[in-house]
Structure formats: C-alpha cells, structure tokens
Amino acid sequence: MRAPTASEAAPTGPVPTPARPPRPRPDPFAEQRPARGIRFLHALNPLAKLAGPLPFMIALVFTRGFAIPIAFIVLVMALLFVGARLTSRGALALVLGTPIAVLVLGVTFGVWVDPSRIDEASAAASVVVVEIGEWQFTLAAYLVGLATSLRLAALLLLSLIAGLTSTGPEFVRAMVQNLRVPYRIGYTALAALRFVPRFGHELEVIRAAHRVRGTDTRRGPIAAVRRGIGYSIPLLASAIRHAERVALAMDARAFGAHATRTERILSPWRVRDTAFVVAFWAVGAGVYAVALQLGVTS
C-alpha cells in the first residue's frame, strides 16, 4: 500500500484563520503614556491646567455678548489642537460638534427667553423668525439664547483643558501632594471612582452569561424590566465582593494608619506649571482688555 505524499496529505480546503481576541477597552484611570513632541499639556501639573482657566470660567458667568466667549472658544480649540493628544473623532467633535451644538442650544435658550429682557427698540426685535398664533420667536430672542449657548460652550471647552489631558489618579495625586488634601479622602474617592469601569465590565459579563443561557431573548418594555432586575442581583453581589476585597487590600497596606503615605508617583509643581498659569492669565486678561477697549462686552 502506497503512503500518501505530502501534497496529498495536506488539506485541500481553505485553512481557517484563528479568530482575533477582542481588543480590551482602555482603562480611563490608567496612567497616560509620556507626551511626545509639542503635546505639552499632558506634561503639566493637573492643578495648573485647572488654575489657569478657572478665573475666566467664573468671569464668563457674568459676561454678556458674543465677542469674549467666541475668543475663548477659538483660543481653547487652538490650545487643545496644539498641546493635547486628540483622536480624529475628538478633533471632529470639536470642529463640527461645537458650532452645531451652539446653534441648536441658541434656539432652545431663545425659546425660553423672558420677553421683558428683549430690547423692543432694537432692529432684531422686529424680525420674526417663527410665529405660532400669538407667540412670536424673534431674532432678538435667538441672539439672547445664542449668547447664553456661547458662554456654556466656552465654559465647557475651558474645562476640557484639564479634562482631556489629565486622569483621575493624576488629579488626586496633585491635590494630595500640592494642596495637602488628606490622602484618606483623596484615595478613598479614587477607589470609589474605579468602581464605575469595574461595574461596566461586570455588567457585560452578566449580560453575556444571560445570552448564553437564552434568558434575554424576549423583547418589549416588560422584558427589559425583567432583564434589569435579573442583572441587578448578581451585579449587587459582585459589587459587595469587590468592595470587601478593596477594603481588605487597603487594611493590609495600613491605609489610614499614619498621617502621610509614601507616594509611588510624584506630582510636583514645576516652573513650567507657573509659566503656563501666568501665560494663560495674561492672554485671558488681554482678551477682556481688548473687548472692553472696543466696547463689545455687551
């Protein structure tokens, strides 16, 4: 009997390729990679990125008009594009999402504007955009709502300077080391925040287990309520087990036994942090000074 050759013994059909394992989701509380090039915002102290915009966030609450909020929106966008690591989706959201949201919110806020706040002598008050019965939506009301939406957009973008370039652990370390916040409060809050992604992962595991057992095939609002109740019990049990493990781990490391703790990662306040805060204050004050000089603050 002739033995089969190598070509005859080889499989003739297509060779199945092994399935790729699912990509793990990034941990929002993980340490960030070192910033490269000119992405300098990631290398700054988180408190510096908060202290720089904070005075102008407070000032924008009492600011009227369009010029100052637009100036801060443009300034922050340029700063984020230069100094932050932005994904293509994040950059697109900043460039397109911000003006769209401002225009839509301008309509929303304009509908709720008190008519007594509108200057009837202005030319925009006589321009009716929408009229339904006796109710009129004028251009002046829309401009008031647009100014409010611009202020909100400027406040949001100013908060993104720190929010997009710092993580929760970095803020906690900065507050504990620089502001002398008790570490018992800071790291306890950080441990509580870490429960959120943990709960998300546990919920995905529970849903997958229910799908394997075929218990979530029904549709409709009643079935959704039943599925929610079925998810809540094992999720609560998992949360209790995780909390016990975290408590035991903190006790084993003598958490709270001493007034201070040794920090694995230092978060010092450097000269570049002071330079960033001073430069941001100078640019922001310049924006207000130019606006006051040109008379475009209202």
Image (spheres, rainbow, N blue to C red):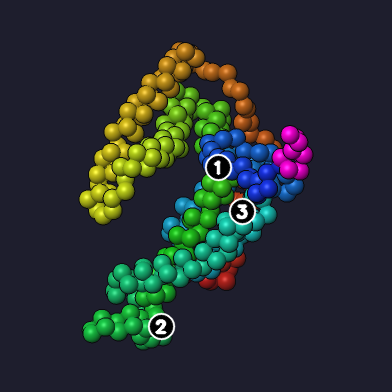
The residue to which callout 3 is attached is 87
| Residue farthest toward the front in the current orientation of the protein | 1
In contact (CB < 8 Å): disc 2 and disc 3: no
Q: Element at badge 2?
A: helix
Label 2 vs 3, first from the N-terminus: 3
Label 1 vs 2, first from the N-terminus: 1
Give the residue displayed 33% in from the left and 42% down from the top. 214
Q: Nearer the viewer, mark 3 or mark 1?
A: 1
Q: Element at badge 1?
A: loop
Q: Is residue 156 visible?
A: yes
Percent of width and height locating residue 48: 59, 41
- Residue 47 drawn above or below residue 139: above
Q: How many marks?
A: 3
Q: Mark 2: which amino acid?
A: Ala
Percent of width and height locating residue 268: 63, 31
State which quadrant residue 291 falls in: bottom right
Instruction: Please tell me how crowded label 1 is: few (under 14), some (14-19), or many (20+) other residues with Cα within 10 Å.
Output: few
From mark 2 to mark 3, how far is it between C-alphas? 40 Å
Residue extent of the magenta highlight: 1-9
Label 3 vs 1, first from the N-terminus: 1
State which quadrant residue 287 falls in: bottom right
Give the residue displayed 34% in from the left and 83% down from the top. 130
Say which mark, if any, is on residue 22: 1
Percent of width and height locating residue 50: 54, 44
Percent of width and height locating residue 112: 31, 69
The residue to which callout 2 is attached is 124
Q: Mark 3: which amino acid?
A: Thr
Left or right of residue 139: residue 215: left
From mark 3 to mark 1, how far is it between C-alphas? 21 Å
